[in-house]
């Protein structure tokens, strides 16, 4: 039996600080004819202190890079704050403007043939900050401000229509299926996000008005003897 030997090298580059990661790059060295992909997710789970770490999302990505013909995958996120466990909605209450600007800068210098993929899944759909971040980014890339074509990953055998599916979900449910790219419906999703934000704004306005009414009722309902005691 004739034995063969193959050495494959995967490198990881993390750009950021100890608490914030702005870009993670996974690259297969020596792959000449591959493409580059820029995948936008929610938040990073590794920092410059843990660049050697392989989380579940990274593992599923690496396992599919050859199949997708990607020699280099750039991982970007709506938020730059490193999360070693799933963050609470309250932890993501502010739009990460610096990070979104950095994404725009990174993508502006990307090769025209590179695929920009939306992969933030369906988490935080009711989170105001997340929806604002998504809308700002989509408008900048595919709206009036930019005309870049956006993509999403789908898998053979999907029995439901998912938009911008996260790699972790694909890896858990469809690891053994073929993955391909289809166009991301940016215009439709921007309309949905706009409506969700308008709805949230109306709800917040009603809640504020209700609180003010309750406070006024409490103020007017102070017992007479209490008012006399304080005078």
Image: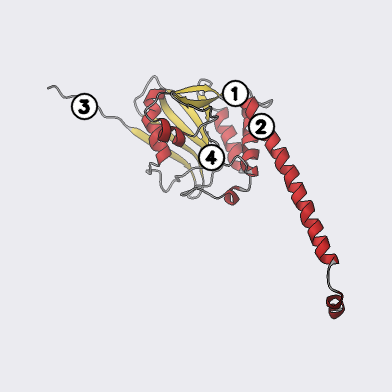
CB under 8 Å between callouts 2 and 4?
no
How many neighbours does mark 1 have within 10 angstroms: few (below 14), some (14-19), or many (20 or more)?
some
Q: CA distance from mark 4 to mark 1?
A: 20 Å
Residue 77 horizontal side relative to residue 54, left or right? right
Q: What is the number of the mark on residue 81?
A: none
Circle 2 sits in a helix, a strand or a loop, which is it? helix
CB under 8 Å between callouts 3 and 1?
no
Circle 3 sits in a helix, a strand or a loop, which is it? loop
Q: Earlier in the sequence, mark 4 or mark 3?
A: 3
Q: Earlier in the sequence, mark 4 or mark 1?
A: 4
Q: Earlier in the sequence, mark 1 or mark 2?
A: 1
Q: Earlier in the sequence, mark 3 or mark 1?
A: 3
Q: Quadrant of residue 202?
A: top right
Residue beneath label 1, please? 148
How many neighbours does mark 3 have within 10 angstroms: few (below 14), some (14-19), or many (20 or more)?
few
Q: Earlier in the sequence, mark 3 or mark 2?
A: 3
Residue 189 spot, x, y in % from top left: 63, 29
Residue beneath label 2, please? 192
Residue beneath label 3, please? 5
How many neighbours does mark 4 have within 10 angstroms: few (below 14), some (14-19), or many (20 or more)?
many
Q: Where the C terminus falls, by quadrant?
A: bottom right
């Amino acid at each position: 039996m004739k034995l063969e030997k193959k050495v494959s090298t995967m490198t990881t580059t993390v750009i950021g600080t100890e608490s914030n990661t702005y870009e993670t790059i996974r690259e297969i060295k020596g792959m000449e004819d591959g493409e580059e992909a820029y995948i936008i997710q929610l938040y990073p789970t590794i920092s410059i202190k843990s660049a050697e770490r392989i989380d579940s999302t990274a593992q599923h990505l690496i396992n599919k890079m050859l199949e997708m013909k990607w020699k280099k995958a750039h991982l970007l996120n709506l938020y730059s704050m490193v999360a070693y466990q799933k963050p609470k909605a309250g932890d993501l209450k502010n739009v990460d403007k610096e990070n979104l600007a950095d994404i725009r800068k990174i993508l502006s210098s990307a090769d025209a043939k590179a695929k920009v993929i939306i992969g933030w899944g369906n988490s935080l759909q009711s989170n105001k900050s997340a929806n604002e971040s998504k809308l700002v980014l989509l408008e900048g890339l595919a709206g009036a401000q930019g005309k870049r074509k956006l993509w999403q990953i789908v898998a053979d055998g999907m029995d439901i229509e998912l938009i911008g599916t996260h790699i972790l979900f694909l890896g858990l449910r469809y690891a053994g299926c073929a993955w391909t790219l289809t166009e991301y419906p940016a215009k439709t999703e921007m309309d949905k996000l706009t409506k969700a934000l308008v709805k949230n704004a109306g709800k917040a306005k009603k809640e504020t008005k209700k609180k003010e009414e309750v406070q006024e009722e409490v103020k007017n309902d102070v017992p007479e003897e209490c008012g006399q005691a304080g005078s």
